[in-house]
Image (cartoon, helix red, strand yellow):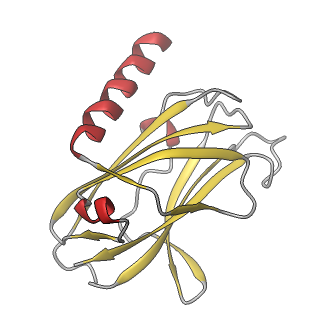
Amino acid sequence: MAIFVLTVVGLMFAASAVNAEQVKDFRMCRSTNCVVYDLFIDPCPEALDNKVCELPQATNVSIAFKYKPKFGSNLPKTRLYAQIFMLDLPFILQMDTNACLYTSCPVVKDTEQNWLYNVFLPKNYPRTGYTFMFKFWDTEPNAHSDDAQCCFKFDVRIV
Protein backbone atom coordinates (compact mmCIF):
# COMPACT_ATOMS: atom_id res chain seq x y z
CA MET A 1 0.00 0.00 0.00
CA ALA A 2 2.81 2.42 0.90
CA ILE A 3 4.46 1.91 -2.49
CA PHE A 4 1.15 2.67 -4.21
CA VAL A 5 0.72 5.91 -2.23
CA LEU A 6 4.32 6.97 -2.99
CA THR A 7 3.77 6.25 -6.69
CA VAL A 8 0.54 8.27 -6.80
CA VAL A 9 2.12 11.25 -4.98
CA GLY A 10 5.14 11.07 -7.30
CA LEU A 11 2.91 11.04 -10.37
CA MET A 12 0.87 13.97 -9.06
CA PHE A 13 4.09 15.89 -8.45
CA ALA A 14 5.37 15.12 -11.94
CA ALA A 15 2.06 16.07 -13.56
CA SER A 16 1.87 19.36 -11.70
CA ALA A 17 5.48 20.23 -12.46
CA VAL A 18 4.99 19.76 -16.23
CA ASN A 19 3.09 23.06 -16.63
CA ALA A 20 4.57 24.83 -13.61
CA GLU A 21 7.63 27.02 -13.54
CA GLN A 22 10.49 26.41 -11.16
CA VAL A 23 10.80 29.13 -8.54
CA LYS A 24 14.40 29.63 -7.47
CA ASP A 25 13.92 32.66 -5.26
CA PHE A 26 12.80 31.04 -2.02
CA ARG A 27 14.54 30.90 1.32
CA MET A 28 14.63 28.56 4.24
CA CYS A 29 13.39 29.76 7.64
CA ARG A 30 15.95 30.24 10.41
CA SER A 31 14.84 27.35 12.58
CA THR A 32 14.24 24.57 10.10
CA ASN A 33 15.46 21.02 9.98
CA CYS A 34 15.09 20.02 6.33
CA VAL A 35 16.18 20.83 2.82
CA VAL A 36 13.63 22.04 0.23
CA TYR A 37 14.41 22.08 -3.47
CA ASP A 38 12.71 21.99 -6.84
CA LEU A 39 9.89 24.37 -5.91
CA PHE A 40 7.30 24.68 -8.69
CA ILE A 41 4.32 27.05 -8.74
CA ASP A 42 1.62 26.95 -11.38
CA PRO A 43 0.77 29.45 -12.77
CA CYS A 44 4.00 31.42 -12.52
CA PRO A 45 5.48 32.36 -15.90
CA GLU A 46 7.33 35.19 -14.09
CA ALA A 47 9.71 32.59 -12.61
CA LEU A 48 11.32 32.24 -16.04
CA ASP A 49 12.73 35.74 -15.46
CA ASN A 50 13.40 35.18 -11.72
CA LYS A 51 10.55 37.53 -10.81
CA VAL A 52 7.88 37.24 -8.12
CA CYS A 53 4.97 34.99 -9.08
CA GLU A 54 1.83 36.92 -10.01
CA LEU A 55 -1.14 34.80 -9.01
CA PRO A 56 -4.45 35.87 -10.54
CA GLN A 57 -7.61 35.99 -8.47
CA ALA A 58 -10.20 33.30 -9.24
CA THR A 59 -7.45 30.84 -10.19
CA ASN A 60 -6.31 27.43 -9.02
CA VAL A 61 -2.70 27.50 -7.88
CA SER A 62 -0.51 24.49 -7.27
CA ILE A 63 2.62 24.46 -5.14
CA ALA A 64 4.86 21.43 -5.55
CA PHE A 65 8.30 20.77 -4.13
CA LYS A 66 10.76 18.11 -3.11
CA TYR A 67 12.11 17.99 0.40
CA LYS A 68 14.38 15.93 2.60
CA PRO A 69 13.51 16.19 6.31
CA LYS A 70 16.05 15.59 9.07
CA PHE A 71 13.22 14.29 11.23
CA GLY A 72 10.48 11.72 10.87
CA SER A 73 6.80 11.97 11.70
CA ASN A 74 3.80 9.66 11.66
CA LEU A 75 1.30 12.51 12.05
CA PRO A 76 2.78 15.70 10.56
CA LYS A 77 0.81 18.94 10.59
CA THR A 78 1.14 21.78 8.10
CA ARG A 79 0.12 25.39 7.61
CA LEU A 80 0.58 28.13 5.01
CA TYR A 81 1.12 31.60 6.49
CA ALA A 82 1.08 35.07 4.98
CA GLN A 83 3.65 37.32 6.60
CA ILE A 84 2.06 40.72 7.04
CA PHE A 85 3.58 43.56 9.07
CA MET A 86 6.12 41.22 10.73
CA LEU A 87 3.33 38.82 11.78
CA ASP A 88 2.88 35.23 10.63
CA LEU A 89 -0.85 34.98 9.99
CA PRO A 90 -2.43 31.70 8.88
CA PHE A 91 -3.38 32.07 5.25
CA ILE A 92 -7.02 33.13 5.05
CA LEU A 93 -7.84 30.22 2.75
CA GLN A 94 -7.63 27.53 5.38
CA MET A 95 -5.77 24.45 4.29
CA ASP A 96 -6.38 21.19 6.08
CA THR A 97 -3.54 20.88 8.59
CA ASN A 98 -3.21 17.12 7.99
CA ALA A 99 0.06 17.04 6.04
CA CYS A 100 -0.62 13.47 4.90
CA LEU A 101 -3.12 14.93 2.40
CA TYR A 102 -0.23 16.58 0.52
CA THR A 103 2.70 14.18 0.96
CA SER A 104 3.25 10.51 1.66
CA CYS A 105 3.13 9.46 5.29
CA PRO A 106 4.90 8.70 7.41
CA VAL A 107 7.46 11.42 6.75
CA VAL A 108 10.76 9.54 6.77
CA LYS A 109 13.96 11.07 8.11
CA ASP A 110 16.70 11.69 5.48
CA THR A 111 14.44 10.49 2.65
CA GLU A 112 13.52 12.62 -0.36
CA GLN A 113 9.76 13.12 -0.59
CA ASN A 114 7.32 15.11 -2.72
CA TRP A 115 4.68 17.62 -1.70
CA LEU A 116 1.70 18.88 -3.68
CA TYR A 117 -0.71 21.52 -2.44
CA ASN A 118 -3.53 22.98 -4.56
CA VAL A 119 -5.44 26.10 -3.57
CA PHE A 120 -8.12 28.23 -5.20
CA LEU A 121 -7.63 32.01 -4.89
CA PRO A 122 -11.10 33.57 -4.77
CA LYS A 123 -12.01 36.65 -6.77
CA ASN A 124 -12.28 38.84 -3.68
CA TYR A 125 -8.85 37.97 -2.23
CA PRO A 126 -6.85 41.20 -1.59
CA ARG A 127 -4.57 42.18 -4.47
CA THR A 128 -1.16 42.86 -2.98
CA GLY A 129 2.28 41.35 -2.42
CA TYR A 130 2.77 38.66 0.22
CA THR A 131 5.56 36.62 1.68
CA PHE A 132 4.17 33.13 2.09
CA MET A 133 5.69 30.90 4.73
CA PHE A 134 5.10 27.20 4.26
CA LYS A 135 5.67 25.07 7.33
CA PHE A 136 5.15 21.49 8.47
CA TRP A 137 6.14 19.82 11.72
CA ASP A 138 6.05 16.66 13.79
CA THR A 139 3.23 16.45 16.33
CA GLU A 140 4.58 13.52 18.32
CA PRO A 141 4.73 14.25 22.10
CA ASN A 142 8.52 13.79 22.19
CA ALA A 143 9.17 16.13 19.21
CA HIS A 144 11.06 19.36 19.85
CA SER A 145 9.70 22.28 17.86
CA ASP A 146 13.07 23.44 16.45
CA ASP A 147 14.30 19.93 15.66
CA ALA A 148 11.16 18.62 14.02
CA GLN A 149 9.95 21.24 11.58
CA CYS A 150 10.47 22.22 7.97
CA CYS A 151 9.87 25.80 6.88
CA PHE A 152 10.56 27.99 3.85
CA LYS A 153 9.38 31.33 2.45
CA PHE A 154 8.65 32.74 -0.98
CA ASP A 155 7.16 35.95 -2.32
CA VAL A 156 4.00 36.22 -4.43
CA ARG A 157 1.76 38.96 -5.73
CA ILE A 158 -1.96 38.40 -6.08
CA VAL A 159 -3.27 40.27 -9.11
Looking at the picture, tell me which residue is in the foreground, 98 or 159: 159
Q: Report x, y in % for residue 104.
A: 49, 28
* Rendered position, 42 above or below 93: above
Farthest residue, direction bottom: 85
Q: Could you tell me which residue is drawn at 32 percent across and 85 percent down? A: 128
Residue 107, percent from left and from top: 61, 31
Q: Which one is nearer the viewer's eye here, 5 or 152?
A: 152
| Residue at x 83% of width, y 49% of height | 144
Q: Which residue is drawn at 39% across and 25% down?
A: 10
Q: In this view, does 24 lie above or below 83?
A: above
Task: Reply above or below: 95 against 64.
Answer: below
Q: Foreground: 49 or 107? A: 49
Q: Quadrant of the N terminus?
A: top left
Q: Position of residue 101 (x, y in %)?
A: 43, 37
* Left or right of residue 156: residue 28: right
Residue 138 lies, in percent from the top left, at 69, 43
For the image, the number of numbered tags is 0
Q: Which residue lies furthest to the front in this view?
A: 49
Image quadrant assignment for residue 112: top right
Side (left or right) of 69 relative to 130? right
Give residue 32's quadrant in the image: bottom right
Horizontal side of residue 92 vs 75, given as left or right: left
Give the residue drawn at x 26%, y 84%: 127
Q: In which quarter of the image is the C terminus?
A: bottom left
